[in-house]
């Protein structure tokens, strides 16, 4: 009977331990399910991002086609630039011709001066003509006097001396008449010259009008060329503005693509890190479970379990730093690992002091204080172990 009772006790303890293991396995499975759900949601997000990347690739292809069109337009712009340069050369030539031509104002001034001189000469000629007319009248008066003298034959003898004297006086008058004739001839030539000068003045006026018309035509053409140049400059400015706006939009789209690629790369890295963490966690739990199921063990085995626990804590901390997101080892896993280590120490009859020292040195007093359960220590190792824990960790 005693052997049967011992067997039943051992079976009861084993059943109790197995039930604990099953309960812990259920918790682990629940946590794994949650992690798998997280992985599934992350995969869905990756699929969404891949769709967005495909859409962005299509947009980039459209952008490349737009860039090819812009290159074609740039060839047109080069042709327009060549035409504008040619127009600029023509305008420069026109300006040079305008500069090389004599100044119309100076020409008109010279013509006006010549007209003024001609007018002055005509006035002088008119004065000369008036003087000649006066001389002619005087000559006529002298002729009438000479006719009256011829009728007075009676007084010829008496007046012979006077006639001689008068004849001597009329000789220079005859010479004066010839001079007057010469003056008349010269006056006629001068009148003809004045007529020709008047015609020349009309021609000069016509030339001035033609110069004015030519100048107005040149100014109109230069204004038209300037207007065309302004229109071409405005078109070029518009093309430059459109190309700059297109480059700005393409840069914005490129930056968005880079951001999306960075996000997708980051999410893929985060998911890969999470998968690595989950795989290492499952491996760690299987190793701890294998150690806890064995009936025999030593302090070295416990040290290996504690070292693996510390490695897992450090692994998840490192993954959190790399992913720039908190990915700590779950608290349930830490508490489960500490509890398994204490169960194995009790089963393998290892001293609590040695196990407790290894836990503090490998895991740190803060982690042990947070996840060590006083009730488990009391049930497994007694009140002395509880006092040791409280004294070491400053627990009231």
Image (cartoon, rainbow, N blue to C red):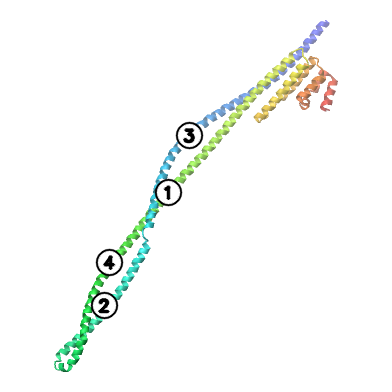
Q: Are marks 2 and 1 in contact (CB under 8 Å)?
A: no
Q: Nearer the viewer, mark 1 or mark 4?
A: 4
In the figure, residue 338 lies in which quadrant? top right
Horizontally, residue 239 falls left or right of residue 366, namely left
Residue 22 in view of the camera: no
Badge 2 marks a residue whose secondary structure is: helix
Instruction: Identify the mark nearer the N-term, 2 or 1.
Output: 2
Question: Residue 339, how many percent across, how many down?
Answer: 76, 20
Q: CA distance from mark 1 to mark 4?
A: 47 Å
The residue pinned by badge 3 equals 64
Name the residue: 31% across, 64% down: 204
In this rendering, the label closer to the viewer, 3 or 2: 2
Tell whether label 3 touches label 1 (CB within 8 Å). Answer: no
Q: Which mark is residue 231?
A: 1
Q: Residue at x 29, y 65 (%)?
A: 202
How dense is the environment of label 4, judged by Cα within 10 Å: few (below 14), some, or many (20 and up)?
Answer: few
Residue nearest the observer in this picture, 83 or 281: 83
Residue 199 numbered tag: 4
Q: Which residue is mark 2?
A: 129
Q: Secondary structure at mark 1?
A: helix
Say which of 251 and 11 sits in front: 251
């Amino acid at each position: 009977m005693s052997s049967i009772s011992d067997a039943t006790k051992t079976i009861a303890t084993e059943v109790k331990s197995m039930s604990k293991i099953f309960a812990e396995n259920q918790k682990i499975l629940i946590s794994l399910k949650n992690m798998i759900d997280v992985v599934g949601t992350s995969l869905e997000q990756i699929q969404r991002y891949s769709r967005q990347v495909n859409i962005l690739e299509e947009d980039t292809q459209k952008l490349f086609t737009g860039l090819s069109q812009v290159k074609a337009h740039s060839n047109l712009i080069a042709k327009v630039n060549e035409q504008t340069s040619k127009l600029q050369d023509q305008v420069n030539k026109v300006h040079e011709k305008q500069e090389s031509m004599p100044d119309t104002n100076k020409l008109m001034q010279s013509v006006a001066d010549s007209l003024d001189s001609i007018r002055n000469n005509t006035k002088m000629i008119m004065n000369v003509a008036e003087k000649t007319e006066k001389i002619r009248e005087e000559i006529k008066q002298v002729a009438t006097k000479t006719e009256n003298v011829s009728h007075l034959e009676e007084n010829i003898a008496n007046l012979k001396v006077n006639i001689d004297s008068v004849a001597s006086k009329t000789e220079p008058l005859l010479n004066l008449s010839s001079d007057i004739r010469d003056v008349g001839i010269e006056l006629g030539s001068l009148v003809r010259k004045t007529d020709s000068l008047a015609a020349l003045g009309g021609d000069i006026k016509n030339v001035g009008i033609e110069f004015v018309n030519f100048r107005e035509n040149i100014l109109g053409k230069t204004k038209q060329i300037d207007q065309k140049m302004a229109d071409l400059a405005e078109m070029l400015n518009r093309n430059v503005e459109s190309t700059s706006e297109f480059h700005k939009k393409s840069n914005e789209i490129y930056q968005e693509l880079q951001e999306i690629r960075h996000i997708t790369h980051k999410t893929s890295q985060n998911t890969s890190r999470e998968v690595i963490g989950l795989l290492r966690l499952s491996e760690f739990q299987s190793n701890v479970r294998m150690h806890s199921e064995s009936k025999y063990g030593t302090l070295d085995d416990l040290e290996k379990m504690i070292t693996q626990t510390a490695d897992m804590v450090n692994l998840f901390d490192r993954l959190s730093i790399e992913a720039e997101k908190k990915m700590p080892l779950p608290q349930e896993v830490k508490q489960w690992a500490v509890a398994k280590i204490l169960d194995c120490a009790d089963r393998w009859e290892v001293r609590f002091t040695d196990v407790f020292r290894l836990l503090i040195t490998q895991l740190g007093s803060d982690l042990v204080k947070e996840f060590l359960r006083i009730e488990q220590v009391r049930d497994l190792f007694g009140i002395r172990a509880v006092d040791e824990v409280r004294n070491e960790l400053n627990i009231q």
